Image (cartoon, grey):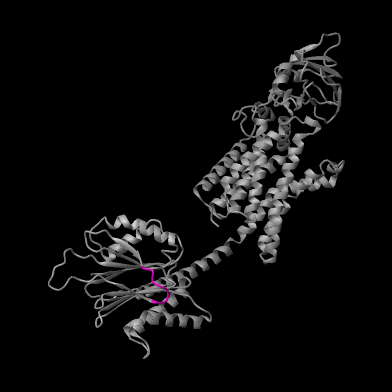
Amino acid sequence: MGSRSVPVMAIAVILTLALMSVILSLSWVQRSELDYLRNSSGVHILENLDWTVSGDAIPQDSPPLTVPFINLASIPVTGDFLLTTEIPVKDIVDVRGGTPSEPVVLALPGFDFIRARVETTWTPPREYVQGEALILPFFVPKTGLTATQYKIIIHITPTPTQKNVLRSSVNQVPLFLAGFIRYKKYEDFSAARRVGSGKQLADIGRIVLAIFSVMLFIFIDSSPECFALGLFMSLKAFGVVAAQRWFSDTLLPAGLVPLLPPFLLSFADFMQLYFFTQLARLFRPRPLHWLAAGVVFGILYTWGTTIEPTLGGTNWGKEVWRWRNLVIGVGCLSCALPVAWLCWRDKNFHRTAALLIASSGVIVQIVTPAIIDIPGVSDMLWYRTWYNLFEAHTPYVFALSTFINVSTLEQRVKSLTGVAVQSSLIEREMSLGREVQKALFRMPELPDGIKMAFSHEAALYVSGDVVFGHHDPNSRTATAILCDVTGHGVQAALKASICSALCESIWEGSRLRPEDDPSKRLDIFYRRALGFFSRTQGSNEVLAMVGCEVSMDLRKVTVYRANAVLPLMISRPNTTSPWNTTVITSPAGRTFDVALPEPAPQGIASSAPKDPVFFALFSDGLIDTSRIYKALLVWLAPRLESQNQWSAASMKDLILSFPDWNETHDDRTLCVIEVMT
């Protein structure tokens, strides 16, 4: 389950540091709403405008009074009065920036009034009553901006207790212009300052939860679903930060600022789908692949939201948003619900609960796009309550689903510890079995002129291959047998030990029946071993066996093969001749004699010294196809000429150095017999 690779850990650490930096930056307390505005881009504060005051705020028969904004607090009020000012149109156009479809909000100072009426150049008069904020959203005309000044006229009926035009100029938020989105952020900031909580704190909670999820992966649970949760929650938190414009506006070009929230939020939704695939354990964890695909998805979605809304009579931005939510939501449910059913059927209840809880977090993602266009539904109290409840708690639902799995960590550790202990005991027993089996691979004391060498590599700790060697000094006969029983591991090793015991009884103990022919001991061994395995297994057994008996007196080598790889003979007439490699095509289940070269007559020196003859016996773990056998012979030919003298050990090493052995996942055994001629 662990997935703490170097790239994954690097991503987790970077996310943690970035999220903690966001939290630290948010902990910087703004001194006032005016400071907040001054530190925000996309906001134009008009505190240097001159205001013209007329009506009951000045003596009768006096001309209108024009003063800076800061001096309005010193002008007394005796009745209704009129305020007039002008804003350069250039300032309005600059605030609109590259998004002409976004309204501009004109926020007027916080006057006290019973009634107020605002008239402007581009908008019809608008009435306000006591308690309402003096804000005026409007669209800036795309063409025809011939005027250089935007005129504002405010008719105010003051409250009975009001003594001045403004109560105070200290920390007073002046007239300012902002894009609609930026103004909404300012409203959230103001609300958070007034009540000490609200959406800002909820969004900060998302960031804190994302940090917790990533740290959970780094320090406690390295499961793929835990990392996927941290990745998904972190991207969602960055999307919230971008949507709230909490980052410094100087970090990115102005044109990218409005594109960052849809990119990050859609990117996060795509990683939400990755989280569900890991929670359901449907695919191997490949976070880098998903991150690359998520970037592409986010770019395509962001491009889709910029399509002209009325193109073809369809609001494309809304449709792209709708289908993004539906496809991701349905994809998440398709991952979770079938696996939840399988887990329930297997009585894996904690995983069932985790998947169902996570599934509840995507309901709002599916339902909202489906019913948002139904008239009146989105304005109903029950819908708004349900939406706020699910939307606010969705990140906690996803986290809870992962924490349910983490809550079983202690039990998993105990289980894995028990498995580890048991595995350690089994490994120790298997190691002992390997040492016992090595004792079966022993070479006898051989006479001058005969040598043997072997190599054995088990697929597991113990194997079904065994090599037996024997020397009979009375008949001057040396025997080598390679047996390969069916199967692997312990059961094969037990059958291999039986083969070794039978060999001992026939060759060492001479346990032959009266009717047995000693010259056919290889055939006798094969039939006894095969009959024993077939009786004990209750079915016909298969035994691969190849053996050689070298008779120095008779100057021959008797070969017996059954279901085994054909043996190989390597020889040359004398030291001046090239080496020959000959595959001994002995018939299966029958003895086959190979004559050895005759020695020189006694008392007469040979014209050239003779080389030994080598016989190589293979298990099918080494040579499993005729193609490999042929490739080995082609490879051996030039290398045999590389040196003048070969021995059984050096010939074994040469054969094993063949680079193109197939990976058969089988026991690999080689025996080489050297016979001096």
Q: Which residues are magenta?
A: 584-590
Mainly helix, strand or loop, the magenta region? loop
Q: Nearer the viewer, residue 247 or 544?
A: 544
Q: Judge left or right: residue 579 versus residue 414.
A: left
Question: Residue 245, position in %: x, y?
Answer: 66, 33
Q: Where is residue 603, by image quadrant?
A: bottom left
Q: Judge left or right: residue 301 versus residue 53.
A: left
Question: Residue 255, position in %: x, y?
Answer: 65, 27
Q: Nearer the viewer, residue 413 or 616?
A: 616
Question: Residue 583, position in %: x, y?
Answer: 36, 65
Screen quadrant of the C terminus: bottom left
Q: Is residue 10 visible?
A: yes
Screen quadrant of the N terminus: bottom right
Question: Residue 104, position in %: x, y?
Answer: 75, 25
Q: Is residue 46 visible?
A: no
Q: Residue at x 54, y 51 (%)?
A: 218
Q: Residue at x 77, y 22 (%)?
A: 140
Q: Where is residue 630, by image quadrant?
A: bottom left
Q: Judge left or right: residue 16 versus residue 441.
A: right
Q: Is residue 486 magenta?
A: no
Q: Judge left or right: residue 386 versus residue 2.
A: right
Q: Nearer the viewer, residue 659 or 360?
A: 659
Look at the picture and state if 445 lies above or below 414: below
Q: Which residue ends up furthest to the bottom in the rendered image?
A: 514
Q: Residue at x 25, y 67 (%)?
A: 612
Look at the picture and state if 401 lies above or below 550: above
